[in-house]
Image: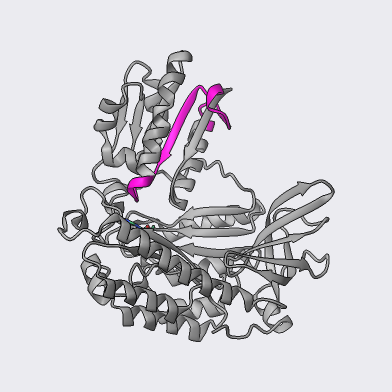
Amino acid sequence: MLKLRLITYGCQANELDSERIAGLLGREGYELIEHDEEADLIILNTCAIREKAEQKVYSRLGTFRELKRRKKGLRVGICGCVAQQEGQALLNRFPYLDFVVGPAQLTSIPTLLRERANRGIATARAPAFSYPSTAPIHRRSGIKAWVSIMEGCDRFCAFCVVPFTRGRERSRPPQEIVEEIRGLKEQGYREVTLLGQTVNSYGKNPRAPATFVELLRMIDHIIEGEMRVRFTSPYPGDVTEELAEALADLHSLCEHIHLPVQSGSNRTLRRMKRGYSRDDYLGKVELLRTRVPELALTTDIIVGFPGETERDFEETLSLIQDVGYDGAFIFKYSTRPHTPAARMSDQVPEEVKGHRLEQALGLLNMLSLERNRAYLGRTVEVLVDREDVKGDAVRLAGRTRGNKIVHFSGEEQRDGDLVPVAITGASALHLQGEIVSNGTKSLWKKDLTTLHPLSMIS
Ligand code: 5AD
């Protein structure tokens, strides 16, 4: 067997792309290993969303120069969004690099590897589907699976590089998605996360015979309560009454939504080209919470977008406060090539961004802690996905339907079990608890509500 070291940066779409790369190369006789030194092939699957992510890639890449000198025959390739963004420039800058492959050209890797004599490049400007649905996927987990339902993005938010690296929006046929999920169910998977850059805009391009909500209903129907379903990330503008209803009705669909807001200031939202106002967003939150009172809500926020004044930033703080998020990823704005925001003249100084980040994180942590404390004394369904044996004690971790991490101890439980856990401790980022019984039976939405009515957390 040839040995493949695959290093992944970035989002869930990249995690899935790495599983595709591993699947494709598994067919070519490669097995995955964990150490750079033993590899015959090293692939960096990269992220370009912020400058820091990109810098990490370059410094890691730098360490392979020496390794290549020592190990004859070692090949090094770069895939993903940095590959797409930089293209030929990477081959020029890193002479020991063997190939550069964009996220939509993964299936060309085996061919590039066979062309041993040449240094290869595959980065299309208008990427089509990034893989044929028949290509094997070597999934890392046997419990939780990512399933891509659409790729690319048509929104062109002023700060975002994704439309340039992952191309225009394209939806997979619903039947193909349903079949993939049916297969996962048969293999015993317990959770599936549907992936798309604007996942709830599914079906528009090319027009699919199902909308996003229809797709959710088809999936719920075939998995018959055997799996949890999540999706990420939805675009706020496309949150509809039907989606709120589906979240309330469908037993498979978890009560969590990650709804990126980016800013609480109308002026900044406009300059970001987000396509909604603060009130539009708050309206969507209200719609969702009215239909699903126990919904956990998380978000993405950018601080220090060009032209963001102290007043704009305060609007973001007040939005965080008004919504009361369960959690959030907060980022300092980072200048990205090709994007309109990079050309804006009123860039915010680094130290101002840093200060705003700290302030926003402080507020967020306070509110998340408050929301997590509301779980104290309640029993929640946890999908076990991490075991950690320390001495005699088995420490377990898993996620609630609201996507909160819970730590607890147990002896008979294993990865993939669904267990009822009584919550005894809460911090801003985690919950702690104790298993209520040794039952590993599923507690789906309706059972959970009758067992332990979920009160509105305000
Ligand atoms: N700078 C900082 N954060 C960014 N994001 C996207 N582009 C940028 C940028 N240029 C954040 C957004 C998005 C998340 C995935 O990354 O909040 O929702």
Q: Is residue 133 visible?
A: no
Up the image or down, 38 lies above or below 358; here it is above
Up the image or down, 170 lies above or below 257; here it is above
Q: Residue 318 location in percent, x, y?
A: 38, 79
Q: In this view, does 2 lie to the left or right of 269?
A: right
Pick the residue in front: 57 or 25. Answer: 57
Q: Quadrant of the C terminus?
A: bottom right
Pick the residue in front: 31 or 406. Answer: 406
Q: Residue 448 location in percent, x, y?
A: 69, 77
**Residue range of the region highlighted in magenta in the rendering:** 26-52
Q: In which quarter of the image is residue 103?
A: top left
> Residue drawn at (50%, 34%), measured in percent from left and top?
6
> Residue drawn at (43%, 84%), measured in percent from left and top?
287
Q: Quadrant of ligand 1?
A: bottom left
Q: How many labels does the image show?
A: 0
Q: Residue 21 location in percent, x, y?
A: 47, 37
Q: In which quarter of the image is residue 62?
A: top left
Q: Is residue 321 left or right of residue 444?
A: left
Pick the residue in front: 42 or 126. Answer: 42
Residue 40 covered by magenta stretch: yes
Scheme of image coloration: one colour
Q: Residue 178 location in percent, x, y?
A: 51, 59
Residue 72 covered by magenta stretch: no
Q: Is residue 431 visible?
A: yes
> Residue drawn at (50%, 27%), measured in percent from left and top?
28
Q: In which quarter of the image is the N terminus?
A: top right
> Residue drawn at (80%, 70%), measured in percent from left and top?
436
